[in-house]
Structures are given as structure tokens and as C-alpha cells.
Image (spheres, rainbow, N blue to C red):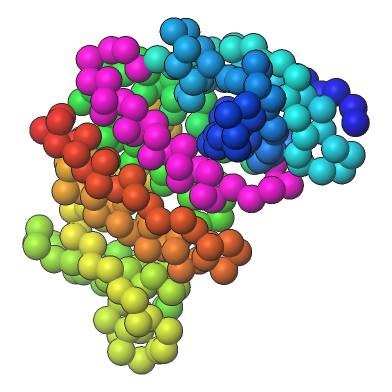
Amino acid sequence: MAIHKTEGIILSSANWSESSQMLTVFTPEKGKITLSVKGSRRINGKRGRPLRFARLEFSCYLREGKESGYLSDVEPLEVYLFEKDGQLGRLTFASGAIELLNNLLTAQDPQPACYQITLSFLRMTDTLEKKRLPGLFAGYILRLVSLLGFRPNLAGCVGCRKGLTEIIGDSPKETDRLMISIERGGMICDDCRSTSPGQNQLVALPVKLHGTLVRLLESSLEEASQIKVSLDNLHQTVDLITSLLKYHAGNIRPLKSFDFLDKLVRAVKTYGG
Ligand SMILES: [Zn+2]
């Protein structure tokens, strides 16, 4: 086995026994790798807390051609402690993001762009004013699923390519809703819905939220964090994304339950939406 040095973020850790731990690490060059950690090398930061949210440098032995091995040493490069106002909410958004990432990444599939935006997301979650976190989180998950090939089509009908105004008219009411076909991964017009098969699973998206999502999809994380996203909107956004992922990513690898949703809603409530 050869020794490697690589930076990475811990996606999950499991205790195998009193003296050993298994880490799942997201690295920019190798994607997801798993490292076993023996006894005294247990990964802990200040005051013995695990370094759950940090950019770390790992020295590790990797099996030839494999994405697994064991840890020799680890050095923190950048640690996100979320000590500013609203610590619980910051931790919850960060946990939700890492859980989603861990569910979506597959072995032997480096995703350097996902790695970089995840670092930006963690940095901003650590430093931004708490009222900007819902927009930041929504922007991050939309960016993440887009990079991984699950970007929802919100520009026009997935069946006939009809544009937005053709579907909802020039002056839509706030209460109007657009239909999203989960199977087809985007907006669908009434005509296509009634004439073509393959859209049994539909999500109704309020016109106003559709506009917010389009803006978020076009935004950098910095811009997204300036967009006001209410509790209700964030919940609907996460619901839509998880429905799309369960259907489309499920074929590749079964996704674990997205149980952070409720935690997330509680976190947003803390901020008053
Ligand atoms: Zn259509």
C-alpha cells in the first residue's frame, strides 16, 4: 500500500468497536473514500469534539486501485465551529447538506466542483448572518443536484418545450400552480399531462416559488444567500428535490431516508422563516 496525502471533508463516521472507527471522506481528486482509524488516532478536535465540519488533510494508506484504506494522520486545515448567533440552526443546515451529499455521491466518481461548493457552503454557514442561511441552503442543494445531473427543468414544459408564459399566461395569480412531473424531471403543461404517459407523480409548485427556484438556480451561493426563502418555501423545495432524487437517483443507488427534513424545518422556525 502506498501512502497518500489528500485533503477532504468527513461525510460520516461509524464506531466499529471501542478502539476503531470507519470514516467516509469526500476528497477532491478521488471522490468518496473510506478509511479505517485505529484507537489512539481517533479523529477529535478541540475539547475532544469530533471534527465533523472541517477541511482536513489526511495522510492515509490506500489499497491499490481501491477507494479504501487506513488513516495514518490527520491535520485540520480549516475548521467550521458554527459559534456565531444561531449555532443550532447552522449545525442543522450543515448536517443536512453533508447527509444529502453522502447520499448522492458514489464511489470512484470524483466531483471536484461539488467539493469546492461544499467548502464554500460550509464557510458561509459559519460566517453569514443567520437570516441568510435558508437562501444559502436552498441555493446549495439546487447547485449540488445540478452538478450531479439531477437539475430540475423549470424553464419550460418537458413534453412540448412550451415556455412559462404559454403555460400560465401573462398575468398569473399568486395562487396559480405549476405542475412538476417527477418522472420526467420538470415542469409539464396541461396538454402534455393529459396526452402523454409517464407522469403519475406530480408536485404542484406555486408560481411565486417557481420564480424563486429559477433565481436560485441561476445564482452563486453568495447571491442565493441574499434571496429570501421562507420556511414554507424551503420545506417545499426540499420536498421537491427529495422526490426527484428518490425517483432518479434511486436507480443508481437506494437513498437513505432524508430524515434531516424535520430537523431543518425546526431550524428554520428558529429563524422565523
Ligand atoms: Zn407540454
Q: Nearer the viewer, residue 224 or 261?
A: 261
Q: Quadrant of residue 253?
A: bottom right
Q: Quadrant of residue 156?
A: bottom left
Picture coordinates of residue 63, whole percent (x, y): 85, 38
Q: Main secondary structure of the magenta part?
A: helix
Residue 108 visible within the image: yes
Point 54% across, 50% down: residue: 104
The C terminus lies in quadrant: top left
Picture coordinates of residue 171, whole percent (x, y): 13, 62
Residue numbers of the magenta segment: 82-110
Q: Nearer the viewer, residue 27 or 152?
A: 27
Q: Nearer the viewer, residue 117 or 2?
A: 2
Point 30% across, 64% down: residue: 164
Q: Is residue 215 left or right of residue 1?
A: left
Picture coordinates of residue 148, whole percent (x, y): 56, 50
When the figure is inspected, residue 199 is found, relative to residue 226, above or below; the finding is below
Is residue 180 inside the magenta stretch? no
When the figure is inspected, residue 159 is found, relative to residue 258, above or below; the finding is below
Q: Is residue 161 left or right of residue 114?
A: left
